């Protein structure tokens, strides 16, 4: 059993399965931290500052929504809290896991479909390769 579990989410359809697995592995008195990482664009010659700010607000809102969606899969008996950070996904997941002294990271084998699946699948791979914290890979059923 694990005292502190980090549960990163990208809003994919696997929240229920991930939440269930994390809950089963949680020690009495333990905590689950649901994390979503919001990407951040920077302005360039091709994008105005106001457009970039708008997109960044939307990315942050989407990350907040992802956390709320995952939190809805836990009942009131589970000690769980949500967190949104801005950064690069794999790097941020590992940084938060280390900072929070997580014992386990529970992550799905890939995220959303299409291009997102390719990119988010690579996030999972990077977390698996670089984390010094135990990682539970939840397989997708697709």
Image (cartoon, rainbow, N blue to C red):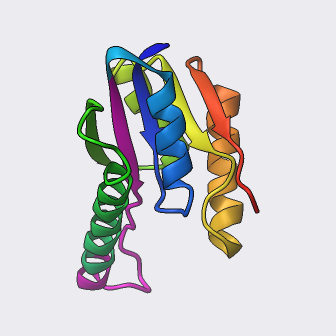
Question: Residue 114 at x, y = what percent?
Answer: 70, 75
In the image, the segment drawn in magenta is 31-52
At a point 55% along the width and 19% down the height, the residue shown is 133
Left or right of 141? Residue 91 is left
Question: As displayed, is residue 124 above or below residue 26?
Answer: below
Left or right of 17? Residue 7 is left
Q: Residue furthest right?
A: 142
**Residue 14's image quarter?**
bottom right
Which of the pair 31/127 is nearer the observer? 31
Question: Residue 43 at x, y = what percent?
Answer: 36, 73
**Residue 24 within the magenta-colored segment of the rendering:** no
At a point 49% along the width and 52% down the height, the residue shown is 16
Check the picture and name the quadrant holding the C terminus. Answer: bottom right
Question: As displayed, is residue 123 above or below residue 92?
Answer: below
Which of the pair 23/4 is nearer the observer? 23
**Residue 55's image quarter?**
bottom left
At a point 50% along the width and 23% down the height, the residue shown is 25
Question: Residue 87 at x, y = what percent?
Answer: 40, 49
Q: Looking at the image, can residue 57 be seen?
A: yes
Question: Residue 42 at x, y = what percent?
Answer: 37, 67
Which of the pair 95/9 is nearer the observer? 9
At a point 37% along the width and 60% down the height, the residue shown is 66
**Residue 128's image quarter?**
top right
Q: Looking at the image, can residue 92 be seen?
A: no
């Amino acid at each position: 059993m694990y005292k502190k579990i980090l549960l990163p989410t990208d809003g994919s359809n696997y929240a229920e399965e991930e939440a269930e697995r994390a809950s089963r592995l949680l020690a009495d008195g333990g905590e689950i931290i649901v994390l979503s990482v919001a990407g951040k664009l920077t302005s360039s010659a091709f994008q105005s500052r106001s457009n970039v700010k708008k997109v960044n607000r939307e990315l942050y809102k989407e990350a907040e929504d992802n956390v709320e969606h995952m939190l809805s899969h836990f009942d009131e008996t589970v000690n769980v809290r949500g967190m949104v950070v801005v950064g690069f996904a794999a790097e941020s997941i590992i940084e938060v896991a280390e900072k929070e002294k997580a014992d386990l990271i529970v992550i799905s084998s890939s995220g959303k479909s299409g291009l997102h699946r390719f990119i988010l699948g690579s996030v999972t791979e990077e977390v698996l390769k670089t984390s010094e914290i135990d990682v539970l890979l939840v397989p997708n059923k697709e």
